[in-house]
Image (cartoon, rainbow, N blue to C red):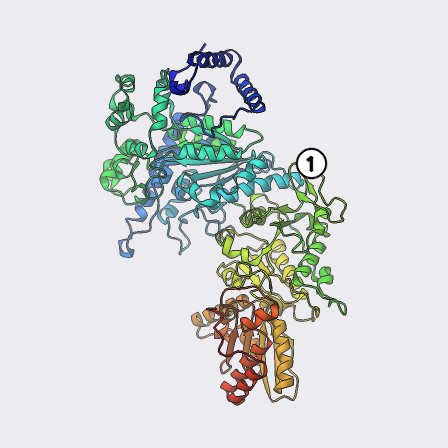
Amino acid sequence: MSAVPESFLGASAVDADAQETREWLDALSAVIDSEGRDRGHFLLEQLLEHARQHGVDRPFSATTGYVNTIEPEDEAHCLGNLEIEERLRAYMRWNAMAMVVKANRLHPADGGDLGGHISSFASVATMFGAGFNHFWHGDDGVHGGDLLYIQGHSSPGIYARAFMEGRISEEQLLNFRQEVDGKGLSSYPHPKLMPEFWQFPTVSMGLGPLMAIYQARFLKYLHARGIADTSKRKVWVFCGDGEMDEPESLGAIGLAAREKLDNLIFIVNCNLQRLDGPVRGNGKIVQELEGEFRGAGWNVIKLLWGSYWDPLLARDKDGLLKKVMMETLDGDYQAMKANDGAFVRKNFFGRHPKLLEMVAKMSDDDIWRLQRGGHDPQKVYAAYHKAVNTQGQPTVMLVKTVKGFGMGKAGEGKNTAHQAKKLTDEDIKAFRDRFNIPIPDSELASLPFYKPAEDTPEMRYLHERRQALGGYLPKRRVKAEEALPVPDLPFFQSVLDPTAEGREISTTQAYVRFLGALLRDKQLGPRVVPILVDEARTFGMEGLFRQIGIYNPEGQKYTPQDRDQVSYYKEDKAGQILQEGINEAGGMGSWIAAATSYSTNNRVMIPFYVYYSMFGFQRIGDMAWAAGDMQARGFLLGGTSGRTTLNGEGLQHEDGHSHILAGTIPNCVSYDPTFAHEVGVIMQHGLKRMVENQENVFYYLTLLNENYPMPGLKAGTEAEIIKGMYLLDEAAKGKNATVNLLGSGTILRESQAAKELLEKDWGVAANVWSCPSFNELARDGQACERWNLLHPTETAHVPFVTQQLGAHSGPVIASTDYMKNYAEQIRAFIPKGKTYKVLGTDGFGRSDFRSKLREHFEINRHYIVVATLKALADEGTLPLAKVAEAIAKYGIKADKINPLYA
């Protein structure tokens, strides 16, 4: 029977009967020794439940001892050739280091400071090696391939491996972070810049963990719906311990546990350092994270100590070593790895005479070889093996490493390790010697890359392991192999037709009609992924609940309160809707997974994520940018948009800037449609581009909750709608002057009303132009200007805005429910000689009726009339007195506070 260490018996001051306590503990030890740990665990669970039922407070600890989770005798043994793997790992370490140092040495004329990171890969090289050699599957046509979220700062190590594999050339390594000429390698994982290599962008820290959780859930979703067999695939996520302070890193771990995502494995690289200092100098980040993940329901595997510690721990009969391991702070652990064996002897083992006695026969070098677990290939293999064989839970591995492992004085364990990128000749020589790289002293100054001959055992082993696992990684699919035709525009006729007399709908309702029609298409319908964040009824989408169901891996175990209703809340194991609750980041995570499914799963999916537009780009803007990097394809829909259209909700709900933010993402195509037919034309065209043509763009449409009659599509305007501008209402003939009123969204209808006032009250004729996208008009104009700049002797390109307005006389007045900058973008492309005035909703939103808000922000029909008359007066067509007359006529408060500051 195993003896119970005295240190585990509790403080004698609170133990009323130490002998009885020992008897209980000895009895439990006897059960564990004779019947195993599982039996011991079962008895403990039964005792705790029994105590709870008798009113005894249950003791709780979210953490375990500061030791490895897997006992040495329970480790799965690695059958690979660890000696060869160590040599390969050494060569990759060298090449990764050389790549970064060369990039910062060779171009002094440009400052010689391209940056790059050595220390991060140095800490994870062993973990990467185990994955690539034994666990990470490529897509061999059957398996589907694992998905890797690589810690961004470790990219040099991935390039170093790809170089050894022959997938990246030496010329590319020499052009690390030098991409403009098309020969280089991106600084971090960027699918946009290396579309056949990197799968996911991860260096915007925190996004990788969040996106990976929803990616793993989406694999389960595809499998449950019978669209793809994803049962063998895993999502592997590398994070830094400092990165876990990003709210996004831990924000969705509850979902992963709740939905039992056993296809998800986090590896947190616990090197105890942030980018410039300790993560928890006064604490223990491993213990903190263990509590977070265990409390959320994850399987936690701690890998803290390498194999050389096993004999010491086996001799630790009284638990003293474990006690000191627990008591030593992370800041002290970091200092130990920044020094040497003598320092560790004094400052760690020297904390108790018994510990000094334990290592008395060990030299300082022996003590220095007491490595952390993340640098022990056998330990890493065993932890990976346990992770991939865990069922019913996601797994997190908390792996302790040293930042800058192997860099010695140049940065190993030092606060400066992250910034180290310019090593001295002495540092390089020490690195060469430590990892036994076969490069002579005479060549060190040139920092040559090292790659063994293809017929060597190392290179044969490297390729054999990847062939056994289905191919090389990371690797990205640029286009899906399947071809899905998109219905022609008449298929969506119900959205294109004018509304019946007396009938009014909103553009949100038009979107729902479009979606309903698409769901009925036999080929595309199953590929639609509606994504909601708890406001289905706000957007009129509750009818989809019963029609296609809400995805829930456990189905619906309860009877919904509204079961007797037509549109009851129906959850289903094969449901099609992804309902994320009050969780915009989660909705975007699911959208990204679906929007990149053509690449990750070879299945084209069509996600439609609808949300309050105010809670879109400003809340998940970093994820939207990542979606652009990932070449996402799908629809984002900003519902209840506009600063004056969502009338009662107030400052934090009213959006007047999402289109400005959307315009900052190069492959985001954005529209602010006014009418149902514009919604239909834009979305059908988007489907053609993204699904049929597989173009790497995604669409953002703002939708309204304001009802009004829809005029229907006028044949011949389809292409102009897509370009961003078409003539909606022509000016009446025979008036004194002609003006051009531009608008989008619901404020276009104010321009239509202003046209009537201008003609009735002032005898001024007005053309009304619908401008569904000032962003697209601006991009077109800028493209024309660039062409003309670079091709001065060729026929000039004319911006579309200039073409449209060129044949129509008079000033131009643009009005939108967005900040003035939205419509200001096209000022440069207004035909010469025309006055251009812009009205917009700069300032904070507020609650009131729409008419009052539009008056407050000075964008209603009366302000449009006044702006028009002022433009005519500026051009000399009307006297300025007419402007003052209009201000008086419409009761405009000329001296009220500017809404920007109100």
Counting from the top left corner in percent of width and height, residue 701 is at 59, 60
Residue at (35%, 26%) from the top-left corner?
Answer: 325
Q: Which one is in front, 513 or 453? A: 513
Please tell me in which quadrant of the rendered image residue 86 appears: top left
Task: Work out which residue is located at the far top of the displayed protein and give it.
Answer: 1
Q: Is residue 848 left or right of residue 324?
A: right
The answer to whether 897 is drawn above or below residue 46 in the figure is below
Mark 1 secondary-structure assignment: loop
Counting from the top left corner in percent of width and height, residue 795 is at 49, 75
Pointer 1: residues within 10 angstroms few (<14), some, or many (20+)? Answer: few
- Residue 151 seen: no
Q: Is residue 752 left or right of residue 398?
A: right
Q: Looking at the figure, which quarter contains the N terminus?
A: top left
Q: Which one is in front, 487 or 660? A: 660
Query: Which kind of residue does numbered mark 1 sit on?
Result: Lys
Q: Is residue 77 left or right of residue 342?
A: right
The answer to whether 772 is drawn above or below residue 837 in the figure is above
Q: Which one is in front, 195 or 289? A: 289
Counting from the top left corner in percent of width and height, residue 89 is at 38, 33
**Residue occupied by mark 1:** 557
Q: Which one is in front, 486 or 36? A: 36
Please tell me in which quadrant of the rendered image residue 850 appears: bottom right
- Residue 83 seen: yes
Counting from the top left corner in percent of width and height, residue 526 is at 68, 47
The answer to whether 702 is drawn above or below residue 520 in the figure is below
How many marks overall?
A: 1
Please tell me in which quadrant of the rendered image residue 435 appears: top left
